[in-house]
Each structure stands twice: as C-alpha cells, then as structure tokens.
Image: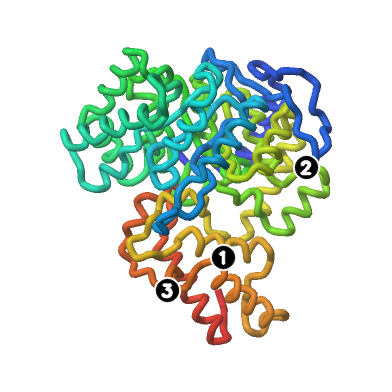
C-alpha cells in the first residue's frame, strides 16, 4: 500500500466514507425500531439491540470480546483465576439484552478465557449465540516450532478449543493476529509451510467451522496478500478500527481507512477490534473530555468511539472487552439501537483525533500479549500509569514549571501504588522477548528505559521528558 497524502485528500475521503456510513441503513436493524433514542443514561433498554445480517447470520452489532474477563486471586495463592461467577452474570446479562456474538482465543486471560466462556455459555441453548475463536499459533511459532511440530501443536490447540468451549462447531474461526512478528515470513510459516491452512480449510468443508476469517495487525503486505492472493474466500476479517486509527495509526499499524476500504470494496464484512484502543479512547486527555462533553453531556466518552465504529455499513459487529457490568450497560445503551454518526459528527471526531495526537501517550492497549514478562515486570501497568498522568495533565515537565513539586509527588506516589516496586520499569534488562508479541508495535524495552529515566530524574528533582 502506498502512503496517501494526509491533508485535504485524506479529509475528503474520510468525509465521503463517513457520509455513506451515516446515511446507510442496509443490514442495520433493531428489535424495536425507534426505541432508545435519547434513552436516559440510568436505563438499559431491552429488546432494542441493533443487528447486522452481512454473513447470513443475524449478529448483534455489539459483540462481547472475552479477552478481559474479571479475574480474582487463585485459592492456592499462585496467580489469578477467572471469576466464573462474575463471568456467568455478565454473559447472562449480555444475552438478555441482545448480544449474541462472543469472541475469544486460546491465549486470552492467561489461557483461561475459552474455558470460562464455554462454561458460561453452555448454560444457554447453543442456537442463541455465535462463538468466535482463533488459531493462535503465533507463540508456538515464536517458540521455534516448525513443520510437523508446529502442525501437531496447532491441531492440538484447535481441538482443545472445542473441548474448552463445550461445542462441536465454531461459528466464526480466525487465523489470529496475522501481520505481526516477521510479517510475510511468519504468516507463511504459521499457515502454509506446516499445512495448518489446509487443515483448517478441510475443517470448514466438514462443517466444524461455519465462517472463516483472519485478524490483522502489522505488516500491510500480509493483509493485501490474504485478500488478493491467498485464494481463500474470506467470510469476514477482523481489523482494528476507531476514530484515532482511521487516519492516525501509530507503530506498525495501518490506517483503518485503508483496511476498511479494501474490505468494503470486496464486500467482506469487518469485525472490529479495539474500538476504544484498549480503553485509551475512554481515558482521553481532560481537554478532549471537555470537548466531547460539551456536545453530548449525557453520553459517555466511550460512546463516541462505539458509535463511530458501528456507523460503517459493512461492519458486522464491534467487539468490546467488558470486564465490568457498568461498561456492558453503557455499551448496550449505545447500540440499543445505534444512532449512526452524522457527517458533521464524523468531522468532529476527526478534529478530536487531531487534538489527541498532540498528547504524548504510549499506544498501549492493555492486551497483555507482552505478558508474562520473564523478569516480572508489569509492562501494561507501567505504561498505563504514565498514560493516565498524561491524559489528566499531571505529567511533571520540568523543575521550574509551576506545580512541579505537586505533580512530581503525585506521579511517584501513584506509580508505587499502581505498580509494585519489583515490577517497575527499572527491572527491565532489555531482553526483547516482549516486542514480537505487541500488536501495536511498541518498542517496549525502549519505553521502559525512557520511563525509568524519567522516574529517576523525578526522584532527583529534575524530570524533563
């Protein structure tokens, strides 16, 4: 993909697509059309969820991402386990309010997500929900497995998904996180050189997989190859799309304008991940919050991002990793039913995205793909504390700045409260084992070194970034 001019042309294309999305109603339905407009924030509508019928299935526009199930300390004191009772309550509430798409993967929640999701959903009729999971053999490849060893381990992973999910078929199956790591070389090694792609295609022919797709981060050559040269008739593709990444993708991610446009041109439905950028678009700088609240005082900051993602007509479902009931309820309000953004509102969010680019946050989505760190660091914890201080305007700049001493103390005290000292950035040795797993392309050791230097400077009373 050639780089596009980012000025007038990009803005014009944005508004053209936005206008089409804002006016489109094909494939978008609600149980009770017209309900939910202006619903008070304290109420959660029932029977008003918006649906899309882009794959022959009637799929809820809000999908449940099962990456961030609530966790609790393990009874044996060794790490955390999924809080199954809380998961059951969230799943029951989601189904009762019209959500019927549940997306998981073998690595999620430290490898516990599929079993927790399967346990919760097995309490309901199988035809009341759609299950999505993934061929997540990227870590197997990263561990050095090749050829038959990689094939055998991948097939074992696939079969274990059925066992943990308590099902005899998968509705939506994906080749997971293509484009990361070594890009084209890794994609070929994971899918073709070892025979995994042929195996999965045969499983689809046998009916154990209903719909086949892939999720993408990273090297755009992989995305283009999958669409143009793989020869696989994709039923759907999962991409990262939000109002910041539409034209301002960072790291090795690709502007969502291009990804969505390529899929829409081929009539391939898009499943949307990271509509909130791992929560970053709900925890924006105070100046941005004020800008959003001025326009819609009754709406949450997060609702703008979810309306953006859902407003595109070729989007099948928008995934959200809802750990807490209040997040689930807020997102149900947004999609029960969806009020598509107007052309003017799309333009407003583009202006908001440009404003957000002025604030130097680290593009961490708290996906925890970098974890566990072999040296015990809480990598997401370090990055999220730094981002929180940036967004709240509390980042100490220099010892001569007004309010420096107060901001310095708040950063250091908050750092110790958020991240145990033995898990802070100063314990990073730069082994680089985390970098290949980061879907945002963050140079994690470099960021750890930068933040550690900042912390040490603060302790010495300096603190220039």
Residue at (49% x, 58% y) in the render: 380
Q: Which residue is mark 2?
A: 299
Residue at (41% x, 38% y) in the render: 220
Q: Nearer the viewer, residue 428 or 19?
A: 428
The label on residue 373 is: none
The label on residue 426 is: 3
Residue at (53% x, 86% y) in the render: 460
What secondary structure is found at the residue carrying circle 3? helix
* Distance CA(mark 1)–CA(mark 3): 14 Å
What secondary structure is found at the residue carrying circle 2? loop
What secondary structure is found at the residue carrying circle 1? helix
Across and down, in percent, residue 429 comes to: 33, 69
Residue 346 sits above or below residue 226 on the image: below
Q: Residues within 10 Å of mark 2 (few under 14, many from 20)?
A: some
- Residue that sits furthest to the bottom in the current view: 460
73 left or right, relative to 139: right
The label on residue 386 is: 1
- Residue that sits furthest to the left in the current view: 148
Residue 59 sits above or below residue 188 on the image: above
Across and down, in percent, residue 455 comes to: 52, 76
5 left or right, relative to 81: right
Which badge, 3 or 2, is on the more N-terminal residue? Answer: 2
């Amino acid at each position: 993909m050639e780089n596009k001019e980012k000025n007038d042309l990009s803005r014009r294309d944005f508004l053209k697509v936005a206008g089409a999305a804002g006016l489109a109603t094909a494939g978008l339905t609600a149980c009770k059309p017209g309900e939910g407009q202006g619903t008070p924030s304290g109420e959660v509508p029932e029977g008003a969820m918006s649906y899309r019928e882009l794959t022959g299935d009637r799929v809820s526009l809000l999908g449940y991402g099962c990456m961030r199930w609530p966790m609790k300390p393990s009874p044996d004191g060794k790490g955390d386990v999924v809080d199954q009772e809380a998961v059951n309550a969230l799943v029951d509430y989601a189904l009762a309010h019209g959500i019927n798409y549940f997306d998981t993967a073998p690595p999620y929640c430290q490898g516990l997500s599929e079993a927790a999701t399967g346990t919760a959903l097995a309490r309901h009729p199988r035809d009341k929900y759609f299950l999505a999971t993934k061929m997540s053999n990227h870590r197997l490849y990263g561990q050095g497995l090749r050829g038959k060893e990689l094939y055998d381990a991948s097939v074992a992973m696939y079969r274990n998904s059925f066992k943990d999910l308590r099902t005899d078929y998968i509705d939506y199956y994906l080749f997971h996180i293509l484009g990361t790591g070594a890009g084209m070389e890794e994609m070929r090694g994971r899918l073709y050189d070892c025979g995994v792609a042929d195996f999965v295609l045969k499983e689809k022919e046998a009916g154990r997989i209903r719909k086949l797709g892939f999720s993408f981060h990273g090297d755009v050559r992989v995305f283009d190859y999958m669409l143009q040269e793989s020869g696989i008739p994709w039923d759907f593709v999962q991409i990262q799309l939000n109002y910041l990444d539409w034209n301002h993708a960072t790291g090795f991610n690709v502007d969502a304008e291009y990804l969505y446009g390529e899929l829409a041109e081929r009539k391939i439905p898009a499943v949307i991940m990271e509509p909130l950028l791992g929560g970053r678009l709900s925890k924006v700088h105070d100046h941005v919050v004020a800008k959003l609240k001025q326009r819609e005082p009754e709406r949450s900051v997060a609702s703008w991002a979810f309306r953006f993602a859902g407003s595109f007509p070729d989007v099948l479902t928008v995934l959200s990793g809802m750990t807490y009931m209040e997040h689930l309820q807020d997102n149900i309000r947004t999609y029960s039913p969806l009020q598509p953004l107007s052309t003017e509102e799309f333009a407003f969010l583009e202006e908001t995205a440009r404003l957000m680019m002025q604030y130097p946050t680290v593009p961490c989505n708290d996906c925890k793909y970098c974890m566990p760190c072999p040296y015990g660091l809480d990598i997401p914890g370090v990055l999220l504390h730094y981002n929180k201080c940036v967004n709240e305007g509390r980042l100490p700049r220099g010892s001569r700045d007004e309010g420096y001493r107060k901001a310095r103390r708040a950063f250091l005290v908050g750092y110790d409260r958020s991240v145990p000292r033995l898990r802070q950035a100063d314990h990073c040795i730069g082994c680089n084992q985390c970098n290949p797993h980061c879907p945002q392309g963050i140079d994690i050791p470099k960021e750890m070194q930068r933040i550690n230097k900042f912390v040490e400077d603060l302790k010495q009373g300096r603190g220039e970034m």
